Amino acid sequence: MNSINVSLLQNFYKIIGVLIDNAIEAVESYDKKEISIEIYIEDNYFVFEIANEFYEQIDFEKLGKTRFTTKGESHGYGLLLVKEIVNNNEEIYNQTEIVSNLFIQKVGIKIKG
């Protein structure tokens, strides 16, 4: 019987929470408030993918830096937390990409075989 690493799962869930919160905040000012979520298995990882439309310029160099935000004061900690969790867990990854006008965040957790 495989044991479950509760701490690893908690960190995975924290990342998902941050990414969903960010996607919701990103679409709040748009007429079309749509977020897509896909869940799938890819290359021995359970992947949670969140996508939302965006129309701003995104500086990938600043994403995940301390207090970087496009949302005003009292923001800028979520993606820093994501970065710290990913850097401290070899079994979790986070990937950001832009396809057309979609901002896509993927987080994957390795499946134990």
Image (cartoon, helix red, strand yellow):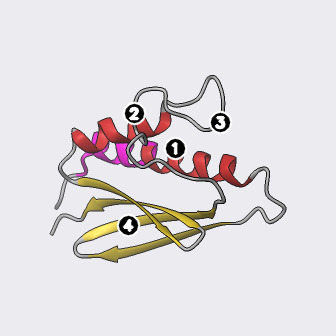
Looking at the image, tell me whether mark 4 or mark 2 is earlier in sequence order.
4
Quadrant (top left/top right/bottom left/bottom right) for the N terminus: bottom left
Tags 2 and 1 touching, CB below 8 Å: no
- CA separation in Å, label 1 and label 4: 15 Å
Q: Residue at x 43, y 42 (%)?
A: 63
Closer to the eye: label 4 or 3? 3
Closer to the eye: label 1 or 3? 3
Tags 4 and 3 touching, CB below 8 Å: no
- CA separation in Å, label 2 and label 3: 14 Å
* Residue 10 magenta-highlighted: yes
Closer to the eye: label 4 or 2? 2
Dividing the picture into quarters, in which one does residue 48 lie?
bottom left
Looking at the image, tell me whether mark 1 or mark 3 is earlier in sequence order.
1
The residue labelled by disc 4 is: 47
Lateral position of residue 14 relative to residue 41, left or right:
right
The residue labelled by disc 3 is: 71
The kind of residue tagged 2 is: Lys
- Magenta part of the chain: 4-14
The residue labelled by disc 2 is: 65
| Residue 84: x %, y % from top left | 31, 35
Q: Residue at x 39, y 33 (%)?
A: 65
Dividing the picture into quarters, in which one does residue 112 lie?
bottom left
Q: Seen from this angle, which residue lies furthest top?
A: 74
The residue labelled by disc 1 is: 18
